[in-house]
Image: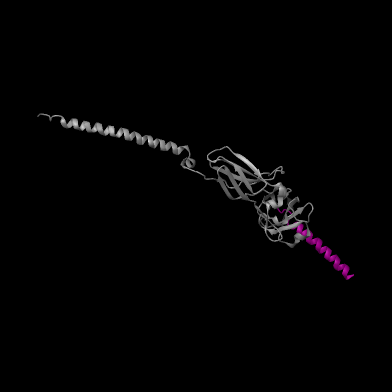
Amino acid sequence: MLRAVAGGRALLLSALLCRLAAADNPELPTAVNITWSSINFKTILRWQPKPSGYFYTVEILGKTSDTKKKCIRTEETECDVTDVLKNVKETYTAHILSVTSSRMDNFEEPPYAVSEEFTPYNQTVLGKPEIQNYTQKGSKLNVVFQDPLTPYTFPNGSFQSIRDIFQHDLEYRLYYWKDQSSGKKDATTKSHTFELSVDSSKNYCFYIQGIIPSRRENRNGQESVVLCTSVGRNILDEYGAEVFIIIAVIAIVVITLAIVLPVILCKRKKAKAAREKEPLNGV
């Protein structure tokens, strides 16, 4: 009898707390403008607005994986979710929960906003390749570069590169052009090197970017820094036709002065001598 009464009181108390919780936060704002930002599989979830009087908790739901919570009761409007997206070919959805600091949030499902779906393998942006070495010898331009690294590691603790994940689905494209020229050529490779036939008398500039040909979107990665060779570079290579024009103008001025100045001086000398031979007035 006493157990039944105690059990009834417990149920009534739970129901009362649930109703109080519902009344306590009936109009909590939910997140808007939810975006996924991912480069080389480092993935940040962002949203708005900044909370005031409440917090956010992020839930990551995979189509074939368990729900995982991140950034629990945070006042921030971004969350690094990289470590819960290790199955990069899985498709994920984020729920951004709006919660209060009260424990009564546990008695009902808090309001939340839902993100668009995100598949890291298809949507992460390829970062900038790092050019390690380049040489131009004769008519051959050789470029050696390195794959960008990801936040994910092997069992030995070393970081996986994007090539370790994409494997044969990854290739690189190099764009190159003669220095001081706007016409571009390109070449592709699945290795870490480029060997190009070029004009041995010209210098070349170039950059590299990763490409995932199988993608419909986000196929091209970020561009590396632009570098230029400096074989047989002279002042005209450095500064172009402007320097030649300036030099020509200076040469013309010098030659002109060399011809005209003696003539002027000679005429002045003759005029002075003529004046000195003229008789003085009244003599």
Farthest residue to the right: give it: 1
Query: Residue visible at 58% across and 50% down?
Result: 133
Farthest residue to the left: give it: 283
Up/down of 255 relative to 120, above or below? above
Residues 22 and 184: in front is 184
Residue 122 colored in magenta in the image = no
Query: Residue visible at 78% across and 61% down?
Result: 17
Up/down of 206 relative to 100, above or below? above
Residues 128 and 114: in front is 128
**Label total for image:** 0
Q: Which residues are magenta?
A: 1-29
Q: Report the predominant secondary structure element of the magenta stretch.
A: helix
Q: Which quadrant of the rendered structure holds the C terminus?
A: top left
Query: Residue visible at 26% across and 34% down?
Result: 265
Farthest residue to the bottom: give it: 2
Res 28 → quadrant: bottom right
Q: Quick check: can you spot residue 81?
A: no
Could you tell me residue 210's position as x and y percent? Answer: 65, 46
Could you tell me residue 103's position as x and y percent? Answer: 74, 62
Is 223 situated left or right of 97 in this image?
left
Residues 123 and 168: in front is 168
Q: Quick check: can you spot residue 209?
A: yes
Is 176 situated left or right of 234 in this image?
right
Could you tell me residue 169's position as x and y percent? Answer: 71, 47
Colour mapping: one colour
Residue 4 colored in magenta in the image = yes
Could you tell me residue 153's position as x and y percent? Answer: 69, 58
Q: Which quadrant of the rendered structure holds the N terminus?
A: bottom right
